Image (cartoon, helix red, strand yellow):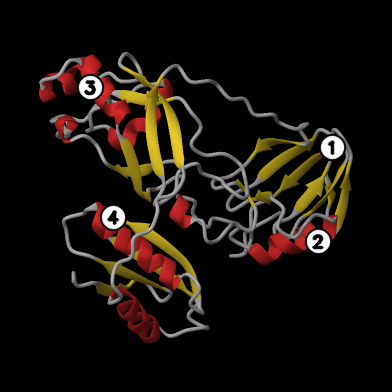
Amino acid sequence: MTMLSIHAVGEAALCCTLPPPASLERQQRIWQLAAELANMPGVLELIPGMNNLTLVFDPLATEPAALEQAVQLQWAKPPRSRRLGRRVDIPVRYGGEAGPDLADVAAHCGLSPEEVVRRHTAAEYVVYFIGFQPGFAYLGGLDEALHTPRRAEPRVGRAGRQRRHRRRANRHLSSDHTGRLAAHRPHRPAALRPRGRAAHAAGAGRSCALRCGARMIELLRAGPLTTVQDLGRSAWRDRGISHCGALDDIALSWGNLLVGNPVGAAGLEFTLGPATLRFSTDCCIAITGTDAEATLDGRPLRPWWRQRMQAGQTLKLAEHRASECAAT
């Protein structure tokens, strides 16, 4: 049995690591370990990586030593066969702007571009784990005849769609997907997940459009790190979705309660610098979590209070005077 090493990642996480090489068999053991630990008291999240599993826990509910012992006990269990997850078919375009290196890949492999496309679409891939964003999957199952080394020189960034490939600037690009791999769905925000399957289908794909509601606030001026934040989300990091959320979650929660929103609704968080906002429709707001002076059309506003805005009015927030610097 391959030895599993465990080390702490801060005060509330453990990383369980296997030595190289990576393989589907080892990744299946990682998935099995995650499934066995999922219902253990104090465990908050389980995040598979390549040959590793990160376990996030509540340090007030359990002890790291107890978790390490539980991990080693579960790892000692014999491997079990488990079905792979659902299959996702991904429409893909090959060559041209979508895959500028298709000819280079074909030449390296001693195949025609058409044969590279045929072999690439013939395989069914397994999602080993999800990377730094939803849909950024690390897949296993590529035909060995298509294995290609990284580029000798990184590709210079280009405008448009190719910008999102900057993390793969030194890798060969023979294709680009045209489907949606992530969406704003609370129950399934990403199409791909660890243990899932993926297949590529050559074709043009289809475009998607998003509907936007009526504009309520026009942000005329804002300092650095002005963002739209809610209370974040937990237990989604295995899908590439970090926790995020407001820096001052208490201030956001109270602001929502004051204006009658759900406690976790999104708000504007101003981290640094002054801000100017103009309202496009009548609404209610609350300014919480800051000692910065606020004025509405030159008239001072009280913080931690429900305020009614009228269309056309302008709200100004001054520089923060103290370390507390979130306004919702």
Q: Is residue 129 visible?
A: yes
What is the spatial separation of the Cα atoms under label 2 and label 3, in whole angstroms?
57 Å
Decide: marks 3, 4 in contact (CB < 8 A)?
no
Q: Secondary structure at mark 3?
A: helix
Pointer 1 or 4: first along the chain? 4
Number of the front mark, 2 or 4:
4
Q: Nearer the viewer, residue 234 or 46?
A: 46
Q: Which mark is residue 257?
A: 2
Please, what secondary structure does the residue beneath circle 1 have?
loop
- Badge 4 is on which residue? 50
Give the residue pinned by disc 1: 313
Q: Which residue type carries mark 2?
A: Leu
Q: Is the residue 181 above or below the residue 12 in the image?
A: above
Percent coordinates x, y for residue 70 in the rendering: 37, 81
Q: Is residue 87 left or right of residue 52?
A: right
At label 3, the amino acid type is Val
Q: Earlier in the sequence, mark 1 or mark 2?
A: 2
Specify the quadrant that holds the C terminus.
bottom right
Residue in the picture at 60% in, 46% down? 227
Disc 1 to disc 4: CB gap under 8 Å: no
Q: Quadrant of the N terminus?
A: bottom left
Residue on which disc 3 sits: 116
Q: CA distance from mark 1 to mark 4?
A: 53 Å
Residue 27 vs residue 183, the one in the foreground: 27
Mark 4 element type: loop
Could you tell which of marks 1 and 3 lies nearer the N-terminus? 3
x, y percent for residue 284: 85, 48
Assess disc 4: are there few (<14), some (14-19) or many (≥20) residues with their C-alpha within 10 Å of its C-alpha: some
Report the Cα–Cα distance between label 1 and label 3: 60 Å
Badge 1: how crowded within 10 Å, few (<14), some, or many (20+)? some
